[in-house]
Amino acid sequence: MPNVPRKPRKQVAALPVMVDPKGQVRVLLITSRETQRFIIPKGWPMKGRKDHHAAAIEAQQEAGIIGRVHKQPVGGCNYWKRRSDHFDYCRVKVFMLEFRYQLPDWRERGQRRGAWLPVDDAADLVDDPGLIDIIRTLPKRLATKHKRLALKPATMS
């Protein structure tokens, strides 16, 4: 990899979560379009939008997910974004998004696969150590802050 730039490019991401009918916390992972790696919905900040709103829009565009996005990030991570002729070093702010429902159609449907996974399985499938930590600490964070998530079963098409 090239030298780390002094100022990473900023990105925002949504961490879609739900509690299944058995009380188990699940995380939505989607595949990237090019490499098919498991990731969470993410993208660039949007002019005129707060970061948490931009993260919710990414979840809608990339996975058709609608929900309640938290205003404060649950953490952040760094990664190298592959471009056609170079890599960008990015710092991602991750915002939890409580699943409400999935749209019947969305912008990137057919370009990505998605799965609702138990926390440990999701953490095992992502590459970024910072994102792994965010996912693994999610149940404790939810219990500590007494957060209640909608008991809504989820499926990805």
Image: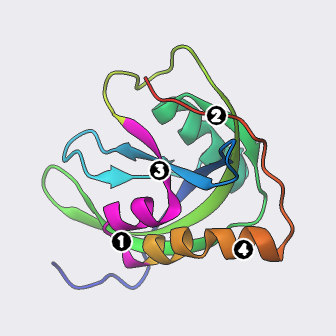
- Which residues make up the magenta segment? 114-129
Indicate the amino acid at tag 4.
Answer: Arg
Between the residue at mark 4 and the residue at mark 1, the CA separation in whole angstroms equals 19 Å
Q: In x, y percent, where is residue 112?
A: 33, 33
Marked residue nearer the N-terminal end (4 or 1): 1
Q: Is residue 4 visible?
A: yes
Q: In x, y percent, where is residue 78?
A: 41, 74
Give the foreground label among 4 and 1: 4
Mark sitting on residue 153: 2
Q: Secondary structure at mark 3?
A: strand
Find disc 4 in the rendering and name its residue. 141
Q: Secondary structure at mark 1?
A: loop
**Does the magenta segment cover residue 123?**
yes
Say whether marks 1 and 3 touch (CB < 8 Å): no
Between the residue at mark 1 and the residue at mark 3, the CA separation in whole angstroms equals 17 Å
Find disc 3 in the rendering and name its residue. 117
Say whether marks 2 and 1 touch (CB < 8 Å): no
Instruction: Check disc 3: other Cα within 10 Å, few if <14, some if 14-19, many if 20+.
Output: some
Between the residue at mark 2 and the residue at mark 1, the CA separation in whole angstroms equals 27 Å
58 relative to 157 in the view: left or right: right
